[in-house]
Image (tube, rainbow, N blue to C red):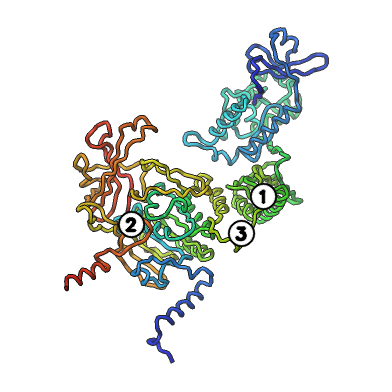
Amino acid sequence: MQTKNAPEADPRPMLTAARLGARRMVMAVDAQAQSLGLHPGMAVAQAQAMLPDLRIEQDDPAGDAAGLNRLAGWCLRHISPLAAASPPDGVFIDVTGCTHLFATGTEDGEAALLGLLVRRLAQAGIAARAAVADTPGAAHALARRGKTQITIAPPGTTRDVLRPLPVSALRLPDDTVQALRRLGFDTLGQMMAAPRAPLAKRFGAGVLRRLDQATGDAAEPIEPVLLPEMPRSRLGFLEPISTPDDLARATTMLCERLCEKLLARGLGASRLDLVFARVDGASQSIRIGTAAPTRQAAHLIRLLTQKLETIDPGFGIESMILSASLSGPLGARQILTDLCTDAAMPDLSGLVDILANRLGPAKIFRLAPVESDVPERALRRVPALGQAEGANWPDRLPRPPRLYTPPYRIDVMALLPDHAPAQFTWRRRPYRVRRADGPERIFGEWWKHEGERWAIRDYFQVEDERGQRFWLFRRGDGQDAETGDLQWFLHGMFG
Amino acid sequence: MPTACSLDARSLDVLRQRIRHLERPTAHHTRILPFDVEAIDRHLPERGLPLAALHEVSGGGADEGPAASAALFTAGILARLDHPVLWCSSGRDLFGPGLACAGLSPDRVLYAEATDDKTVLLVMEEALRHPGLAAVVGEVFRLPITASRRLVLAAEKSGVMAMALRRHHGRAEKTASPNAACTRWLISPLPSTPSPVGASGLGRARWTIDLTRCRGGTPKTWIMEACDAQGRLAVPAELGHGQAAYADQKRA
């Protein structure tokens, strides 16, 4: 990840400099300076000779590290509970099991997640490159040496995508990379094919370890970043635990402790991350969210234990950390007594949280009326716990309890312009219409879509011989061709 | 010594109550929701629908695929309850404004979208444990007997009404497969009588309401006018007083 700061509107090229012995060296340059031929590692005097009008800032490694940590903390809050800074310029995020939350209609979860990350960072003035791969090492290499800004290595292809990358893609010291080059190693594929023993003898075990970490032969756990302001509680075990009962009991203990901390600070948690450290060094995590900040231990314990089954304890879990990655102020509240007689809406937040964590937050909702005559636009989804609006749809208009989206095309026999159908065919079955009501004329909403300027739908409610009632419409008013093509549709069922 | 013949209606009620206590020793068993239609309420052993129980509604006759009249019948029952209700479905064709036409206002309905029957049943069971709700509706294709027993237990414990709205694909599965529902209803559309306004216009929809199973009672069939904007059924004019009046008129 390349980070170039552009804090205020200063049009001059910028670089940061630090003193190395007697010389002042360029440590980092911004995009503009880079395009003018400056690069890190040159002397400041030389850079100034090339471009006299430069903005030079003092290099601040501690500030950079703190900024990177803040960025990792942002990822921890918004992307995944396992995120860590990788100095000097990267952030590792373990996205296992949370990509589906970002999936959109057109993109799958991983692509959408990386796109979102790069866009959000660009808004913050950070030019970023991102990659997803099976191992942190491979993702690290692809993010820096990949051909595109966003790279996705499908599962199981790690070795194939690594092969063409240069040796410098491994996290190795510069002199080691130079020495490897001198020996004729240009790509990682050549290193993978070479015998291991001579390599280890010549360069030490470090080179092979980096290579194995990239290919997945050696494990590389991500140690999540610690944010001091985030309420957390930790539980270490003398003996690793693995049974579901033990995990549930430990979760309960952690939750109760965390709730005490939240109470002491006057906070309520709206998101909890539970990270499991396994004996083999791997980390697993579960994340739950609540609709409103809460510190009811019983409620949070239920939400967490519901997801415990997704955890694979392997050979055992040696420690668990529970942290409230999102929290909000929550004061003390008066318990309702019998003195209070107003019949308030019962508190459904517990149920909504449980269902939202089981089905997904978008799957539990209420409907609110929208002032639109077009039936499918007359409603919108609102959060399940939002304020009741007291609004209702106009009750004079008949609307069916079942609405088909998209409507079914049907073949109809009807007199033009404004007679109800006498007979129609739906799914190859004929229906004879006995009675009908209509038309209810609905005009297109030209302010939403130019093509609807003249559009008209005529709705009929019809009853067939067996008493079944349908909601049909015809596109167009039957006189003016501009209003529609006179095609008939079945839009809903009354029963 | 009292004989069977000397038992009057009141002592029968007392006996029924005691049996009910033995069957379900919970606090919620006495709450019922009457239909406010004398003919139906008189037939039900509890003079209405017990709230802490599972009820099953399916579409019959011409309405087997979409179960639209069954959905309206259910919405009509929920409309006459007080608190929020949860409606869980795996179909994508439920239309809120249509339910509002049966008196179920949008502020009172929480919708939950599930992917399959199994998830719907899970969600129902979870929601039934929550006493803040008045009722939980689940739209399912199948209702296995074990799942239905679990729903019954959850409903009896919390006092939340459970409604299983069946969505059959044709006659693939008979409605008659056993489950633990307290009452089972089959709602089929019937041709309506002409509207008083125009000769060919639509009047109020009309249903055949089959009570196919009723715990402590017997099956029965009624012909009723569909739910109005407050969710109430009505006896068709020519079958109720109207018919008697008509007969009286003819005699006179």
Viewer can see residue A325: yes
Marks 1/3: CA distance? Answer: 15 Å
With respect to residue A453, does B109 lie above or below?
Answer: below
Residue holding disc 3: A336
What's the amino acid at mark 3? Leu
Residue holding disc 2: B171
- The subunit carrying tag 1 is A
Q: Quadrant of the N terminus of chain B?
A: bottom left
Whether labels 2 and 1 share one chain: no
Residue A124: x and y, percent? Answer: 62, 28
What's the amino acid at mark 2? Arg
Checking the image for residue A331, the label placed there is 1
* In this picture, residue A147 sits left or right of residue B225: right
Marks 2/1: CA distance? Answer: 57 Å
Residue B134: x and y, percent? Answer: 49, 59
Residue A144: x and y, percent? Answer: 63, 24
Instruction: Please name the residue shown 53% across and 70% down the image.
Output: B26
Q: Residues within 10 Å of mark 1 (few under 14, many from 20)?
A: few
User: Badges 1 and 3: C-beta atoms under 8 Å apart?
Assistant: no
Residue B234: x and y, percent? Answer: 32, 63
* In this picture, residue A160 sits left or right of residue B118: right
The residue lying toward the viewer, choosing from B131 and A368, is: A368
